[in-house]
Amino acid sequence: MLKTLPRHAAMEQFPILEGELHIAGKPISMLAAELGQTPFYAYDTKIIDGQIKRLRETLPASIKLHYAIKANPMPALLQHMAARVDGLDVASGGELASALASGMSPADISFAGPGKRLEELDAAIRAGVLLNVESRREVEALADLSHQLGLPARVAVRVNPDFELKSSGMKMGGGAKPFGVDAEEVPALLTRIGELGLGFEGFHIFAGSQNLRPEAIIEAQQQSYLLALRLAANAPSAVTSLNLGGGFGIPYFPGDTPLDLAPISENLAALAARAAGELPQAELVIELGRYLVGEAGIYVCRVIDRKVSRGQVFLVCDGGLHHHLAASGNFGQVIRKNYPVIIGNKASPAQTETVSVVGPLCTPLDILAERMELAVAEPGDLVVVYQSGAYGFTASPRGFLSHPDAVEVLL
């Protein structure tokens, strides 16, 4: 009799048919054969489109939806996103080039990052994208470059707020941070932006990421709006753009509950109504990365060896932390937790056992699953890691120990 393993919300997006996981209508073993190699990442565009549709139907129509491409900058995926969102947010010159190549209008691209090089600032001014300035040094450099080029730089101030997004996976604001300009220093910087004749447009306030508590996101959005309203009094011109950040999380671990968008939508509608009177020229922007693409991707590697060491079973695979640092627990987790993992070609197993899934690297950190109940697997079977559409391929140390690289496919 085939056994059904426990599945939580993070594992429902890909169907299991005749005992095998399918993605975009294909059995995982067929996809592996077509690609001709493992490991690989696969992304399902229908799941991405469904997530965007859900947001469009739930959030107020006036809210602009931007994609933070650091979550997943795969060129084919980026072109897909550019046709479906209102803007792209980049964090390097390389990402800027990718965003410009995607077909998105430069007017709808913004550039944030605490250490922008002069050549990156130059490229951004020439392209006509919005620069989220993060220091006095950047403002002065932009003024010099604008004078040399005869092009006024478009700027917004990235603010390091005096609050943080509570219960967020990664805190990007509040306290001492390398990101943005401390809120109390912003008025003086705004004065300087006006003196230098830069093209001021607004504010970018990003308090944190990966949050599943709507009440925490709502509180951060409300405080971000009030902070921007207060700072607008010192602005050299009207605020036309207010990026409220993101923070929308996805479920990774047992017990995680999918984010409830309804109360967030209600709050954004209230803020939009306020902004219509208090910041009448401002577009309100939500910047999301993981929430748009994270659940649409899987990472697949192949079992090379099955080993038993003092009673513990290890499945040694051809992929690991060098391709998927986050799943190994080494990308910001304080306490290591297992991502959702299955044996993709034995998704309805007759027998299960408790195993650890490890990679080929000579380090004890190379773990994809630790003491999980999985199908009894042998060399050749396919390990699938869910929730791998964001912060996977490009967020991992792929050159470590010089193993073969993974490939990516958009389906």
Image (cartoon, grey):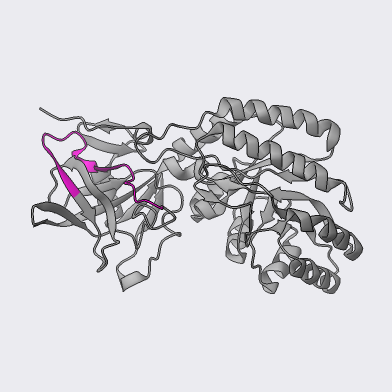
Query: Is residue 126 shown left or right of residue 164?
Result: right
Image coordinates of residue 224 in percent, x first then y, are 70, 42
The residue lying toward the viewer, choosing from 181 and 281, is: 181
The residue lying toward the viewer, choosing from 49 and 222, is: 222
The answer to if 196 sits in the magenta stretch is no
* Residue 2 seen in the figure: yes
Q: Quadrant of residue 330?
A: bottom left
- Residue at x-position 38% and y-position 36%: 10
- Residue at x-position 28% and y-position 60%: 366
Q: In the rendered view of the protein, which quadrant contains the N terminus?
A: top left
Query: Is residue 339 shown left or right of residue 302?
Result: right
Given the current orientation, which residue lies at the most extreme right position? 195
Q: In the rendered view of the protein, which quadrant contains the C terminus?
A: top left
In this rendering, the answer to whether 268 lies above or below 207 is above
Total label count? Answer: 0
Q: What are the residue bounds of the magenta stretch?
A: 334-355
Query: Is residue 94 shown left or right of residue 295?
Result: right
- Residue at x-position 46% and y-position 39%: 250
* Residue 60 seen in the figure: no
Q: Quadrant of residue 230?
A: top right
Image coordinates of residue 324 in percent, x first then y, are 36, 56
Image coordinates of residue 325 in percent, x first then y, are 38, 58
The answer to if 344 sits in the magenta stretch is yes
In this rendering, the answer to whether 115 lies above or below 226 is below
